[in-house]
Image (tube, coloured by chain):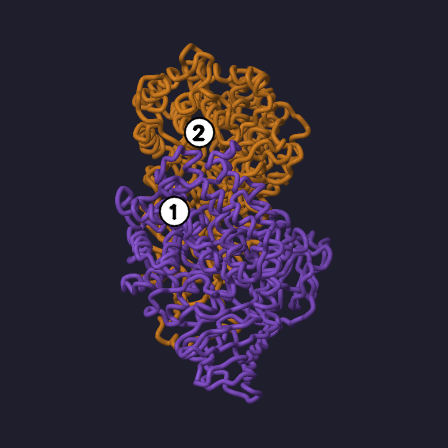
Chain colours: A orange, B purple
Amino acid sequence: MSGGPLLPREQRWLTLEPIVDGLVTINGGFWGARQRLNREVTIPYGMKMLEESGTIENFRVSAGASRAAYQMPLFRDSDLYKVLEAIAWERAHGSDPVQEGFFASSVEAVRAAQSADGYINTYVQVVLGGERFGNPAMGHELYCAGHLMQASVADARTGGRGDIAGSLSDVANRFAQLLVEVMSTEQRAYVPGHPEIETALAEMYRAHGDRRLLDLAADLVGRRGKRSLSWHSFGPAYFQDDIPFEDAMTVRGHAVRALYLLAGATDVYSETGRPQLRGPILAQWRDLVSSKAYITGGVGARHKDEAFGDAYELPPDHAYCETCAAVALFMWNWRLLLLTGDGAYADLMERTLYNGFLAGVGLDGTSFFYENPLHVREPTSRQPWYDCACCPPNAMRLLSSLEHYIATQTSDGLQLHQYMSGTVRAARPGGSVLELTVDTGYPFDGTVTVRVTRAPTDVQEIALRLPGWASGASMTVGGRSVPAEAGADGYLRLRRAWSADDEILLSLPLGPRTVEAAPEVDGSRGCVAYERGPLVYCIEGLDLPPGVDLRSVSVRASAPARAVPGFRVAGDTVVALHVDGHVGRPPRPGWPYSDLPTGQGAGEGALPKPFDTELCATPYYAWANRGATTMRVWVPKWP
Amino acid sequence: MSGGPLLPREQRWLTLEPIVDGLVTINGGFWGARQRLNREVTIPYGMKMLEESGTIENFRVSAGASRAAYQMPLFRDSDLYKVLEAIAWERAHGSDPVQEGFFASSVEAVRAAQSADGYINTYVQVVLGGERFGNPAMGHELYCAGHLMQASVADARTGGRGDIAGSLSDVANRFAQLLVEVMSTEQRAYVPGHPEIETALAEMYRAHGDRRLLDLAADLVGRRGKRSLSWHSFGPAYFQDDIPFEDAMTVRGHAVRALYLLAGATDVYSETGRPQLRGPILAQWRDLVSSKAYITGGVGARHKDEAFGDAYELPPDHAYCETCAAVALFMWNWRLLLLTGDGAYADLMERTLYNGFLAGVGLDGTSFFYENPLHVREPTSRQPWYDCACCPPNAMRLLSSLEHYIATQTSDGLQLHQYMSGTVRAARPGGSVLELTVDTGYPFDGTVTVRVTRAPTDVQEIALRLPGWASGASMTVGGRSVPAEAGADGYLRLRRAWSADDEILLSLPLGPRTVEAAPEVDGSRGCVAYERGPLVYCIEGLDLPPGVDLRSVSVRASAPARAVPGFRVAGDTVVALHVDGHVGRPPRPGWPYSDLPTGQGAGEGALPKPFDTELCATPYYAWANRGATTMRVWVPKWP
């Protein structure tokens, strides 16, 4: 059985359904390579880091099996849970005894640390002497619980040992049952400072059918907004506790918190259709998309509180854009896509996946970025791990479950949202099967070949997303041209009785495209960025001519960029872009503000002369894989 | 006796000397009004807030005289010390029994809390059970000690009770003596995480002549740079502990820490001439001025760690620009001015004083800004106080001691650095006196009248700073024109045997000036700012035509701004600027990045039509005094 995240029990509120009885795989191509790297390198590396960092040892300490010093931060438990979730999803890609061994011993460590009543949080158990729920704002108890539950759902859905005593599902369910009890009695006013459990409870409900879990999720969404949470300079808005969810029409506060809450609220809406939730969910999405997202799909402009800024507060150099926020944005938009069927959500998923998310993982699989700014002035390198290691395991679980996010079904047929080489097989009403294979060099090549390999005899609709950036697309079916005109929802629809070996050929013109920002965005004014297909590009300092400082570089925006295939980045082959560039004078020392007209100092003759040159831009996701470098996405226009 | 901050004992390393035997006063005019407001409103308000916030109670708790809960943050002691310093400086402006009563009772509370061996820090004494020096990075013990010492110096210099038992000088000196002992023995590796004590020790040395205090200051500057300090994500650079001071050629890390350390290092250099210090001091100044200061003289671009960013990382909307950093920058540049005699330092003092600093205090004297960004998109108000209340008391002590920073002397004569109505009287060699009165409507009026009221018979030089922004200045002496040509140091020099009633009339053309930023500054690209005299201007949302959003506003940069006197801002009268503005279409909802050429949606006909209009700019320091508003200093150019 496939069946990854989000198998709604109440399908009636959804426009699209995940593929339940069927199989979606990614084989080869761009994402196949990334899944393999994740499986073979990143997850084993993560297992090692969890041990070295003391994350697993914390559980042993809690169980009384170790006397090691407790390792902070206090939400470290969740790092393990996320890796366990990734390992569970990996079962769909084949058996791995080493990972299964790690899984089993880790689950045993977790189980051994669990209190008799089901409670588990090593920080509370070890450091706080078992004093529970004392720090709603920053304690992360329910956040960690949520990740435990998500790991257990992955385990249950991929052939884990189910609910038998000592299994991960059993551990998670015992904790969930405790929370159902406690959160409705002595802790009925408790607001979890870091949302995550809401979506996790909804997923557990989907996996096991216990309605009380969904009710608790709905309760936790609904009890926010009474301004009970604050922590030092972080007020209630940081925790999305400033106004009730039903009245909140803008995204604000800590970005990961905001997006997990939105995912949870969308889950609750998807299962219950509770009408008060729909307005704020959609309004917050519009607010984010209109004025609080970077071109990379990265979100969270502010470092201090890892938070959304004001509308249009999007400085490239200060961009925080936490990798976890990209994961959360991706997960939330998947829920919105299922709910509405609108390709705009799949568009944003694509943008975030290929850019703001993927930049968080190095091409070697063992180096990471926690923050993903769009302009880096000092040579910067990826990091091997973080004390606050939330991002790398989050990337692992998303990459391991990626195939669950690329296709859906309706009673009418199948929808392809993301173009990745692989197979999509779905049971059709009446017991028949529709199976497609997808073959594509996407994102570097815009040709997507969809071959029907099994088909029922009746009419089926195959819907293909036409990305928002694609104009001039063309399509053939069985070699004959058909109009590539998408509906208002952004999908090309083909309805017919299909036969095995029918072939759909979609050609998406990738660009390159030269892009401007709205004038309200301060830091991108007078600049352009380059895109090709779903990829946002950047210029890295290490690709500049010798001696040239990235600060001196501008581009002739009127000249189109030229695609250059076969460019090597640290062992990967990408399509680079060549653009007409200009290298101006280096920054002048001295006060950087001058009366108009800009004075041209007499001494400037000694400076290097400006010159025109061809510049090379590479995909943003691939930056900082060839050593420390400067980088910018938005480049000033010249003249 | 006057004699405020910085009376060096070793004058030989200085180019200029503070006015020791003499008197400098500010009477009336722009700063006279601000000093009066500070004395009559802000300091009494601060006294009230210190009591209400529990700051003084902490001392009573420490002394065993109260059982109240300890009030954080852990550096709260310093808030009281700074207000005591301000009250001491206020003695030069007249007797105030209420403030003296507060001073006496507060000193008694401090004394009662002091340990038998001289140690005092209420957090350590109350919360940590007396466990001293355990948290060099964030404990702030020596930071608080430094502010205690600075208050005691102010007390000693303004007729306080001197070193008699129980006086503030006695309390401070007992602690200083303990530190001299402890820091050279058991704590010889201790690096104070927040510099401040270095400059305080130097000032105590100047006041009392105890050389061991200066030696400790030098030792504390010299022992930094061994990378022993870090705290969570704040590494050694945050604490200026990444490299030895003598090797540090860039400003970096927490801005207030960096600038107090530089002030202390400059003090040590001023007193010892230790050659290794001069290079890094001057290099760090050039680094700051070339690429790490905002046009307001505000510094510290990053919120997360209240820190300097990379070179040219100066986004207007993310600007942190803590008011305390402006105070520290002002104090450091005064030391550089004395050292070198170079008007560039006085220029930066002026810029910071009138803009980045003064914006931190509301026109009502009871509202404050801790952060001073240059672009605020959401309507924002001043705050009545802060939990972390470092800034308001810092503003009080600077305003109370402001007259000490405006004039200096040499053996040749007097130098006027800042133009404020008042009197400058200095003893001249041989027992005579040179006394000047200054009368000016500065900063709104560029005419400065300097009248000689007492003069010796011999030749004296009067030097007047020609601000860096002033071109086309003119000057008369006794009604006769003299060339207003400044030397390389930025000063106009007049040497003669002066007579009482000689009058110097300096006319500074104030502008307005339209200013551009260097292209390396992302967030100001394609924008201009306006200045007039020493003032930076801004546009406040509340001055826009009804219904106009500040985000839609641009200016025709080629048209000069026009000065409009008599503009009222919350009871104050300022010179506003009128500029040719343009109101464009409001921001369009939807994805804010678009392919070139920018698509003009068919639906736009329904939007309001763009129109030209006159816009009103007001001094930056005066913003947010008429209610919550948006604001920007850098305004996009149109077309």
Residue reaching furthest to the left: B185
Quadrant holding the C terminus of chain B: bottom right
The image shows residue B191 at horizontal and vertical percentages of: 32, 46
* A217 relative to B116, above or below: above
Q: Secondary structure at mark 2?
A: loop
Residue B117 picture location, percent across and down? 35, 41
The structure residue drawn at horizontal position 50% and vertical position 62%, both measured from the top left corner, is B352
| Numbered label attached to residue B142 | 1
**Residue B111, relative to residue B199: is it above or below?**
above
Q: Are marks 2 and 1 on the same chain?
A: no
Q: Chain of mark 1?
A: B
Give residue B391's position: percent from left, percent from top.
52, 51
Residue flagged by tag 1: what amino acid is it?
Leu
Is residue A631 in view?
no
Residue at image position (46%, 40%) is B112
In percent of width and height, residue A6 lies at: 53, 25
Q: Nearer the viewer, residue A631 or B66?
A: B66
Q: Chain of mark 2?
A: A
Q: Which of the two marks, 2 or 1, is nearer to us in this view?
A: 1
Q: Is residue A253 left or right of residue A12?
A: left
| Figure check: A87 above or below B299 | above
Question: Would you name the residue on which mark 2 appears?
Answer: A401
Crowd class of label 1 (few under 14; some 14 to 19; many from 20; radius 10 Å): many
Q: Residue furthest bottom?
A: B480
Q: For this view, does A535 lie left or right of residue A224? A: left
Q: On the image, which quarter does residue B535 sit in? A: bottom right
At mark 1, the secondary structure is helix
